[in-house]
Image (tube, rainbow, N blue to C red):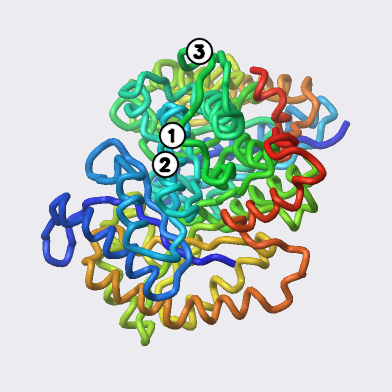
Amino acid sequence: MQFGIFSVGDVTPDPTTGRTPTEAERIKAMVTIALKAEEVGLDVFATGEHHNPPFVPSSPTTMLGYIAARTQRLILSTATTLITTNDPVKIAEDYAMLQHLADGRVDLMLGRGNTGPVYPWFGHDIRDGIPLAVEHYALLRRLWREDVVDWEGRFRTPLQSFTSTPRPLDGIPPFVWHGSIRSPEIAEQAAYYGDGFFANNIFWPLSHTSRMVRLYRQRFEHYGHGRADQAIVGLGGQFFARPRSQDAVREFRPYFDVAPVYGHGPSLEEFTRDTPLTVGSPQQVIERYASMRDHVGDYQRQLFLVDHAGLPLRTVLEQLEILGGEIVPALRKEMASGRPAHVPDAPTHASLEAAARAAAPAELAGEGSR
Amino acid sequence: MSGRRIVVVSAGLRQPSSTRLLADRLADATVRALAERGVDADVEVVEVRDHAHDLVNALLTGFASEPLQAALDAVAAADGVIAVSPIYSASYSGLFKDFFDALEEDALADTPVLIGATAGTARHSLALEHALRPLFSYLKAVVVPTAVFAASEDWGGPGGVDGRLAERIARAAGQLAELVAAREPTARPDPLGDVVPFERLLGS
């Protein structure tokens, strides 16, 4: 099982000091956080993609390429890559390039984006969100899997004899997760292709996440990719931990109370009851997240949001020490116990390459995929 | 015939509330009118006040607390709805609107709805026609022709200030009962239980 962190990349004033980091500070802080993630033994760093203030990460592969050069082991991912407003040709090129630079330590999570004006800024309409995600992804898959593509669709200029370069590393496209909070169509899309499904669990009740994951698993089996419990599931999560739980609550509350998205709304107590946010001792975080598989089944990837709402870099790095030092080792043990042998790990470049090699005598590489 | 479920949404703020008083009168009259047509009905009352904080939280976070979600689900699964608001500043109260804003899209589509309102004076009565009725038309509900307004003075004499509140309640309840009795009991599909196969999404 993979553990990691995902960042929204928000530039938010620290409510306890009133100080707002500069864009430069925030961007460098994201890099420092990613390097720390590798140092403390996490598996994945994923960056958001945004095209409006107060967010900085508009250019994920630039940032991930830089992090790739300074890490050895960390898987670089996104949360999410906008499959709606980005040109699928550019996604195909950028992430294949990143694969080569990062020696295959790359996957990505696709999402639609819910900021209305971003669509017209990139020549689209939010009301086409689902059809855009469907058409763009169908093209993206072909660009990575076919050397020469002729294509025509609704949303982008047609392509004749187009070759996306560089070709994916070793002929293996990056593994794709489809992220969604509430759209069954996206769970269906992930299931249809046998891709991963990431439920960003952090703002919503677990009962809802559990229904979405069940749908994805059923449809994954329906489309013949394996048994329902072999589908590839990721979850978002959120915590703030200190050795003594009352210290965690006291320190996190001022950030929680005015945080983007849920600030000025539910109390910290209500929100920790109704969503997976856990504020307390490392042991409380371990217990809460060890129970996730009771709701969604054995799963493959757990990402945590640790660096939002104006938390200072120093605090975030301390949280990563606790995450890597105490929480994740305990969770690895918990999640491994009783996990059936037929439940796969999250695909990586190495595992996909091995699978392709194993399948090669039976079918030519590149065939057999939708 | 099998039973029907009437859900009352009452947005009065005081306790006791004249809005709730009117809502209960409308509900009782509706149950009687359905019984006259040989239809059993249960009544469930949603006091919007009980969900006030959760409504604001739901607007900010995008998800409803468990008790609020149960109330929203009840409205979405209702065979008929009785919606009553106090009139503030020439319209329904903000809290009343927050509740209907928190409903899923199409939750009230084709649902028979009886609208009612209360206020200090009868001068507010047309708010039913210029505010509540368009709101429910937008929500694709089937709003019964008679809307019932009760001003403070209506509670004073037998049958209200013009002697006709009881008559209006009975007429409106009869219209709601007629619509509810004519429809099959509501079965709302689970949005996650009814997936569009991906081939169809690809082809669209």
Residue A254 left/right relative to B63 = left
The front one of B198 and A169 is A169
- On screen, residue B197 above or below A54: above
Question: SS for tag 2?
Answer: helix
- On screen, residue A290 above or below B170: below
Q: Residue at x 71, y 36 (%)?
A: A369
Label 1 vs label 3, nearer the camera: 1
Cβ atoms under marks 1 and 2 closer than 8 Å: yes
Residue at the spot of label 1 = A93
Q: CA distance from mark 1 to mark 3?
A: 17 Å
Q: CA distance from mark 3 to mark 2?
A: 23 Å
Cβ atoms under marks 1 and 3 closer than 8 Å: no
Residue at the spot of label 3 = A158
The image quarter containing residue B72 is top right
Q: Which mark is residue A97?
A: 2
Residue B18 left/right relative to A190 = left
Question: SS for tag 1?
Answer: helix
Residue A171 seen from this side? yes
The three-letter code of the residue at mark 2 reads Met
The front one of B133 and A241 is A241
Q: Residue at x 73, y 42 (%)?
A: B42
In the orientation shown, which residue stands out farthest toward the bottom?
A244
The three-letter code of the residue at mark 1 reads Glu
Q: Residue at x 39, y 69 (%)?
A: A38
Dot 1 falls on which chain?
A
